[in-house]
Amino acid sequence: MRPTGETKLQILEKEILILRRQIRSLKSLHARRAEELRGLKKIVETFQQGVTLKDMNGRILYSNAAEARMHGYTAKELMGKEGRILGARDDGRRMTREQLDGMTSWRRERINVRKDGSTFPVQILSDVITNEKGKAVEIITTCKDITERRLIEEILRKSVADNQAILTAVPDPLFHILRDGTFLSCRAKSEEDLALPPALFLNRKVNDVYPPDLARLTMAFIHKTLEEGTTQSFEYRIAVPLPQGEPRDYECRMVVCGENEVLAMVRDITLRKGADAALQKSYDRLHRTLGETVQALAVTVEKRDPYTAGHMRRSTQLACAIAGEMGWPGSQIDGLRIAGLLHDIGKITVPAEILSKPGRLSEGEIILIRSHVQVGYEILGQIDFPWPVADTVLQHHERLDGSGYPAGLKGDRIIPEARILAVADVMEAMTSHRPYRPTRGRESALEEVAQRREILYDGKASEACLVLFQQKAFEFES
Ligand SMILES: [Fe+2]
Ligand SMILES: [Fe+2]
């Protein structure tokens, strides 16, 4: 029995209506899908990385602008081409169909080839797209040009290799030490170079390894190196091997190596230290010998003229005191001392009777006595002193206003040593007794220096001389 009131035609019309609704709904769905796809495509087109869609035979269905540009093609040119044209021929690691079946996504780095045949490294990320039945139907791949990254990696690798080569070439033991004093590494050509075997340093702290004094010193320099960022060095002595070995001397140079780490290069300087000590000893002995020789020469001169005995020694005592008062360094005073002790050595050629002659001297005798500066210059000029000894002797009778001899030099054309010695020479001579005149006394001598300073005598040297006598109780030795 057919339902009442509903004909076959009416049923058909109803079904057609339903079908039409379904078609409209499908059309609208399709339009939305198409809209979504256009949106997605737009996004993919703006990607900086290459994107390719391939079918399961490897044929390119789509590639974005970046992918095409990266490989020197247009997107249109790539469409329908075999995907493998983008890979280098010698890249043998292509996926087989069987392999693809078992995979959903994979990442790898390989060499790709451009349209002009040039190659470049890429990083590839591929994903398999499946249909509703789970069957693989397409492969979507993103491709990134990693030329720049590879270049940086190569530079870094080379830099690390260079650093390693430099460190290997350094013959001295090397330590990497952290800010807190932990030894990170220890490298030495020979274990005997170290206070402990290398393995005993590793992961231990400076305080646990070194004696307390050296540990404190090392920690202070680690912090100084890290804070100032400059190379620091210090010397130390340690028993090798610890704790009962022979004491040895080392020099440690520290450089910053990373934010919280220093590289310490340790050099054994025991031999150099020993040589330095021996050299110092030899220098001291030589210095003593030179002093004794100079003294012997001075005595030889003074022996011929007992009245002036001690004159050179006492003049020297005052000259050195004046130089000290003027703040001269010890090394320069050493030269002044030698010049002072020998300043009248030229008198050796003057007959003793003229030197000690009472009364007035003839013009010829005066010339003979004055020649002592030139003779002294010639005698001492033959010795290679590290100070201007001969010139000091030659100029010790020159006066600031040019009234002195032998050259009548003026002002600062007279060397400082001679300007000081002139003051001391005059002071000593005037305060001593001579056979041909009585002593003029200290006060009179000081007055002469005070009145003629800046005229005959150097101002600063005169001032220092006055200070020594009037404020610092200077006394000539007997
Ligand atoms: Fe003299
Ligand atoms: Fe003199």
Image (spheres, grey):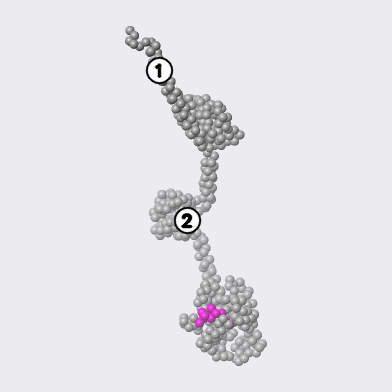
462 in the magenta segment? yes
Seen in the picture, residue 161 relative to 343 is either above or below; the reply is: above
The type of residue carrying mark 1 is Leu
Q: Of the residues tagged 2 and 1, which is closer to the observer?
A: 1
Q: Looking at the rendered structure, which numbered label has been put on residue 229?
A: 2
Quick one: label 2 or label 1, which is nearer the N terminus? 1
- Residue found farthest to the bottom: 359
The type of residue carrying mark 2 is Gly
In three-dimensional space, the C-alpha distance between marks 2 and 1, rounded to whole angstroms, equals 86 Å
Which SS class for mark 1?
helix
- Residue 11 x, y percent position in the rendering: 38, 13
Report the magenta residues as a range.
Answer: 456-466
Q: Residues within 10 Å of mark 2 (few under 14, many from 20)?
A: some
Seen in the picture, residue 81 relative to 118 is either above or below; the reply is: above
- Residue 210 x, y percent position in the rendering: 41, 56
Residue 128 as seen in the image, left or right of residue 4:
right
Which SS class for mark 2?
loop
CB contact under 8 Å: marks 2 and 1: no
> In percent of the image, x 47 and y 59: which residue is there?
234
211 in the magenta segment? no
Seen in the picture, residue 227 relative to 454 is either above or below; the reply is: above
> In percent of the image, x 53 and y 84: which residue is there?
450
> In percent of the image, x 59 and y 88: which residue is there?
356
Q: Residues within 10 Å of mark 1 (few under 14, many from 20)?
A: few
Q: Looking at the rendered structure, which numbered label has been put on residue 17?
A: 1
Quadrant of the rendered image containing residue 381: bottom right
- Residue found farthest to the top: 1
